[in-house]
C-alpha cells in the first residue's frame, strides 16, 4: 500500500502540503503547515467540546489532504474538495491507507459544490488559501456570495485569505481590504498571520461565523448582534465594534485595524486591566467574564443583565419616572465614588434599566479614578448635570451624542430639579462631589422653587469658562459630525455603485439579444457589438466619474449631482438612438433598461438631499451655541 502512496505522490504536479503519515515527504512540502494545523486543531477541539460530539468537516481546496486527515480523529465525517484529480487520488489513497472510512474526497470546483450546500450541513468549513483563486476566476462579488452561503449553512468558517499586496498575478482581482470578503458574516476574529512560500506578505487566518463567537480560547453561541451600540450613535465608532448577545452574556468585539484604533485600544485596555487585576465593582456594574486580545482585536465577555438601555426606552417612547432615575443615578455614582471611581462617559445609552428596577452602568472602559472626562466638559460633575438634562427632555428629538452646555436651572421646568441645580451652583465648584449632589437632591425635595438661592460668585467665572471652552474646543462634537458625514456618504456611494454595476451587467445580457437581432433583421453582428462596447465604455466612464467625485467630496471638495445626471441622460439618449438605428423591437427590454436608469437618477437625487441634510447639521459651532443659549 505504501508503494501505491509513493506513486501517487510522485504523480503530483506540486507538493504543497506535508503528506499525512509519511514523514519522509515532509521536507519536500512547499509550505510549512504544522503552525497553522495547531490553530485549526485548537478551533476544532473547542467546537467538539462546545457541541459535545464529533464534528462534520468540509475542506475546500484540500490539496494533499493534510488538514482533513489530521482532523479525522475528532470528526464524525469529513468531505474534501479539490479541482485537481491527482490531489483527490492521493487523498483517497491516504484515507484508505489509514482506514478512515468516514473521510471522503471529491474532484469538483468550489463554486459548484457550495451551490449544493443545505442548512446546517457542516460544523467546520476550511477555506485555506483558496478564495483568491476563486476571486480571480469568477470575480470578487461572486466569491463573496460563495463565502456568505458557506457562513449561512455551517457553524464556523476558517479562512486564510490572500492580500492584494502580494506580488502574484491574481492580486489585481482581490479587494483592497482583505476583511471585506467577510463583511456580511456576523463575527470575525483574526487568529494569527502567516507568511507564505510565495512572499513575505502575511495572510490572516480568520475565524468567522453567523452563529458562534470565539477568541481562540473560548467559544460560545450568540442569538443576535449589532454594529451600533445604541440608537444615537449614528456611526460614531465607524463600524469598528460589534456587539453579540447570548442567553447569559454580552460579547463586545473591538477592532484595531481602522481609524478608531487608538480609541478602541484605550477603552479595551482599561477593561482588560480591570479583568486581569480581579477588580470587583459594585453590583450595578456587570461582571467581566473573560477578556482576551491580540494584535488585531480585543474581545470582552460581560455578564448579561435582563432589561433595556435607557436610550432604548426613550427611543421607543416608553414611560419612566424622571425623579426615580435621577435619584438612582445619584445613589450609584455616590457608591462608585466611595470606591474612588468615576464613570467618565455616563450617558443615557450607558445606563441599563434592569427588570428589578435597579439601574446598571455599562461601558466599563469609561470607569477610572480620574474626575476628568475625555471630552467637553472635562469634568464628571458638570457632565452629570448635563446628563440630567438628557433624562428630563427624554422624549425630545434633540438628544444627540454631542454635549451642550445645559448647566443652569433656567433649562429645567421640574421644581425639584430646578432647586437642586440652584443648590449645586450655590456651592463652590471646588467642593463638588457626588455625595454632596445626593444630599442636595434630598434637600431640594424639601424646598420650594421660590426659595432664594444665588449662584456662588466663584461659579460665575467657572460657568463662563465652561461655555467658552465649549465654543473653542469640543472634539467629541467634531468627531461625531465628521463620522456621521462620512458614514452617510459612504452608504450612498456603495448604493449607487451597486446600482451602476447592476445596470452595467444588464448590458452584457444584450449579447444574446444581438444574435436574435442578427437573425431577425440581418444586421452585422460585429457592428452591433462595437456599438455595445462603445456604450459600455460610456457607462464605465460614468462609474469612474462617480467614484472620483465622491472621493473629492470626502476630501472636502464640491460635488455636482447635475453633472452625473447629464451623463446619465446623455447615455439614455445614446441608447435610444442605438435602439432606433437597429430597429430593436423588444419594448420590455428597453423599458427595463430605462427603469434602471431612472432608478439611478432617483438615487442621485437622494444623494443630493442627503448632502443638504448633512450640511444643515454642520453650521458653525458658534452659531449653534448662540442658538442654544439665546433661543429666538
Image (cartoon, grey):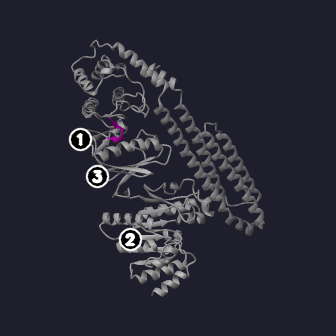
For the question of whether residue 519 can be seen, the reply is yes
- Residue at 25% x, 27% y: name it: 435
Q: Which residue is mark 3?
A: 248
The residues tagged by marks 2 and 1 sit, at their Cα atoms, a distance apart of 42 Å
Q: Upstream in the sequence, badge 2 or badge 1?
A: 2
Q: Upstream in the sequence, badge 3 or badge 2?
A: 2
Query: Which mark's residue is nearer the viewer, 1 or 3?
Result: 1
Q: Say whether residue 367 is magenta.
A: yes
Q: Describe the element under mark 2 as helix, strand or loop.
A: strand
Q: Which residue is mark 1?
A: 283
Instruction: From this view, report whether residue 115 is shown above or below residue 308.
Output: below
Q: Say whether residue 493 is magenta.
A: no
Residue 133 lies in quadrant? bottom right
The residues tagged by marks 1 and 3 sit, at their Cα atoms, a distance apart of 16 Å
Does the residue at mark 2 contact the one at mark 1 (Cβ under 8 Å)?
no
Does the residue at mark 3 contact the one at mark 2 (Cβ under 8 Å)?
no
For the question of whether residue 363 can be seen, the reply is no
Seen from the viewer's position, the closer of residues 504 and 303 is 303
Residue 351 lies in quadrant? top left
Q: Describe the element under mark 1 as helix, strand or loop.
A: loop
Q: Which residues are magenta?
A: 362-368
Report the disc number at residue 56. 2
Horizontal and vertical percent for residue 27? 50, 74
Instruction: From this view, report whether residue 332 is shown above or below residue 124.
Output: above
Amino acid at each position: 500500500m505504501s508503494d501505491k502512496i509513493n506513486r501517487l505522490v510522485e504523480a503530483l504536479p506540486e507538493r504543497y502540503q506535508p503528506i499525512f503519515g509519511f514523514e519522509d515527504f515532509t521536507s519536500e512540502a512547499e509550505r510549512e503547515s504544522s503552525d497553522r494545523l495547531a490553530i485549526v486543531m485548537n478551533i476544532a477541539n473547542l467546537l467538539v467540546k462546545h457541541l459535545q460530539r464529533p464534528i462534520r468537516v468540509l475542506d475546500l481546496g484540500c490539496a494533499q489532504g493534510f488538514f482533513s486527515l489530521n482532523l479525522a480523529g475528532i470528526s464524525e465525517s469529513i468531505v474534501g474538495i479539490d479541482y485537481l484529480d491527482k490531489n483527490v487520488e492521493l487523498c483517497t489513497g491516504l484515507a484508505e491507507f489509514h482506514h478512515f472510512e468516514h473521510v471522503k474526497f471529491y474532484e469538483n470546483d468550489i463554486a459548484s459544490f457550495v451551490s449544493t450546500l443545505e442548512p446546517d450541513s457542516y460544523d467546520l468549513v476550511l477555506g485555506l488559501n483558496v478564495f483568491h483563486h476563486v476571486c480571480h476566476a469568477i470575480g470578487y462579488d461572486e466569491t463573496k456570495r460563495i463565502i456568505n452561503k458557506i457562513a449561512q449553512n455551517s457553524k464556523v468558517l476558517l479562512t486564510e485569505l490572500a492580500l492584494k499586496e502580494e506580488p502574484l498575478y491574481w492580486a489585481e482581482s482581490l479587494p483592497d481590504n482583505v476583511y471585506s470578503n467577510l463583511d456580511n458574516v456576523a463575527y470575525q476574529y483574526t487568529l494569527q498571520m502567516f507568511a507564505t512560500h510565495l512572499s513575505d506578505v502575511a495572510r490572516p487566518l480568520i475565524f468567522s461565523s453567523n452563529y458562534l463567537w470565539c477568541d481562540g480560547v473560548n467559544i460560545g453561541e450568540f442569538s443576535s448582534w449589532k454594529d451600533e451600540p445604541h440608537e444615537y450613535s449614528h456611526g460614531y465608532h465607524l463600524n469598528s465594534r460589534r456587539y453579540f448577545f447570548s442567553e447569559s452574556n454580552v460579547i463586545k468585539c473591538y477592532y484595531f485595524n481602522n481609524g478608531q484604533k487608538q480609541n478602541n485600544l484605550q477603552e479595551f485596555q482599561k477593561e482588560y486591566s480591570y479583568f486581569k487585576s480581579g477588580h470587583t465593582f459594585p453590583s450595578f456594574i456587570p461582571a467581566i467574564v473573560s477578556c482576551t486580545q491580540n494584535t488585531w482585536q480585543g474581545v470582552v465577555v460581560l455578564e448579561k443583565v435582563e432589561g433595556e438601555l435607557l436610550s432604548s426606552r426613550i427611543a421607543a417612547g416608553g414611560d419612566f419616572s424622571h425623579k426615580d432615575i435621577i435619584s438612582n443615578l445619584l445613589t450609584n455614582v455616590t457608591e462608585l465614588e466611595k470606591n474612588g471611581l468615576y464613570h467618565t462617559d455616563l450617558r443615557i445609552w450607558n445606563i441599563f434599566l434592569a427588570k428589578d428596577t435597579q439601574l446598571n452602568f455599562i461601558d466599563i472602559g469609561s470607569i477610572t479614578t480620574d474626575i476628568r472626562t475625555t471630552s467637553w466638559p472635562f469634568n464628571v460633575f458638570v457632565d452629570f448635570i448635563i446628563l440630567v438634562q438628557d433624562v428630563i427632555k427624554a422624549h425630545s428629538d434633540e438628544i444627540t451624542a454631542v454635549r451642550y452646555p445645559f448647566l443652569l436651572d433656567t433649562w429645567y421646568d421640574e421644581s425639584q430639579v430646578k432647586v437642586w441645580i440652584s443648590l449645586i451652583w450655590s456651592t463652590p465648584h471646588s467642593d463638588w462631589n457626588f455625595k454632596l449632589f445626593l444630599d442636595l437632591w434630598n434637600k431640594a425635595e424639601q424646598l420650594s422653587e421660590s426659595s432664594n438661592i444665588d449662584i456662588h460668585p466663584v461659579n460665575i467665572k467657572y460657568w463662563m469658562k465652561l461655555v467658552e471652552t465649549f465654543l473653542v474646543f469640543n472634539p467629541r462634537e467634531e468627531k461625531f459630525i465628521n463620522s456621521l458625514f462620512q458614514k452617510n456618504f459612504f452608504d450612498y456611494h456603495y448604493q449607487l455603485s451597486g446600482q451602476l454595476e447592476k445596470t452595467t451587467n444588464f448590458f452584457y445580457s444584450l449579447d444574446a439579444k444581438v444574435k436574435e437581432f442578427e437573425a431577425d433583421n440581418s444586421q452585422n453582428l460585429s457592428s452591433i457589438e462595437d456599438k455595445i462596447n462603445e456604450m459600455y465604455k460610456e457607462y464605465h466612464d460614468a462609474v469612474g466619474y462617480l467614484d472620483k467625485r465622491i472621493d473629492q467630496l470626502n476630501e472636502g471638495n464640491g460635488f455636482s449631482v447635475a453633472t452625473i445626471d447629464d451623463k446619465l441622460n446623455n447615455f439614455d439618449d445614446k441608447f435610444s438612438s442605438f435602439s432606433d438605428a437597429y430597429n430593436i423591437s423588444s419594448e420590455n427590454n428597453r423599458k427595463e433598461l430605462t427603469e434602471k436608469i431612472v432608478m439611478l437618477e432617483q438615487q442621485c437625487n437622494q444623494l443630493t438631499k442627503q448632502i443638504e441634510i448633512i450640511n444643515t447639521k454642520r453650521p458653525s459651532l458658534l452659531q449653534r451655541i448662540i442658538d442654544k443659549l439665546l433661543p429666538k
